[in-house]
Image (cartoon, grey):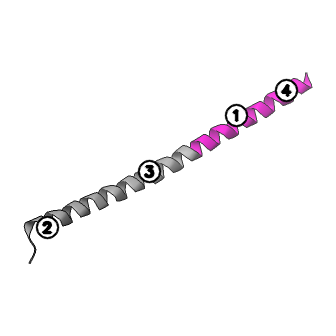
Amino acid sequence: MFEFSQYLGFLLFLTILTIGFWLMFFLVGFVSYWVTGASWEMFKEKRAKKRQEEQSVKY
């Protein structure tokens, strides 16, 4: 049937595949969180700058 080395190779392949899947799953979640947070911070900075310029024009 199978030799022991073939069985170990198959287990190693499954282990690497599983680690790669969970790493990809984690990175997709982390990168989307990072991009969303960076975009929100940039939006808040632009909004604050716009408000500051409006206040400086009034006075």
| Residue that badge 4 annotates | 55
Q: Position of residue 55 (x, y in %)?
A: 85, 26
SS for tag 3?
Answer: helix
On whether residue 39 falls in the magenta region, the answer is: yes
Q: Is residue 49 left or right of residue 10?
A: right
Q: Foreground: 23 or 12?
A: 12
The residue at the point 10 percent across, 74 percent down is: 2
Cα–Cα span, label 4 and label 3: 42 Å
Q: Which mark is residue 45?
A: 1
Q: Which residues are magenta?
A: 36-59
Give the main secondary structure, helix, strand or loop, of the magenta stretch. helix
Q: Amino acid at mark 4?
A: Gln
Q: Residue furthest right?
A: 58
| Residue that badge 3 annotates | 27
In terms of sequence position, does the residue under pointer 3 or pointer 1 come before the other? 3
Q: Position of residue 21 (x, y in %)?
A: 36, 59
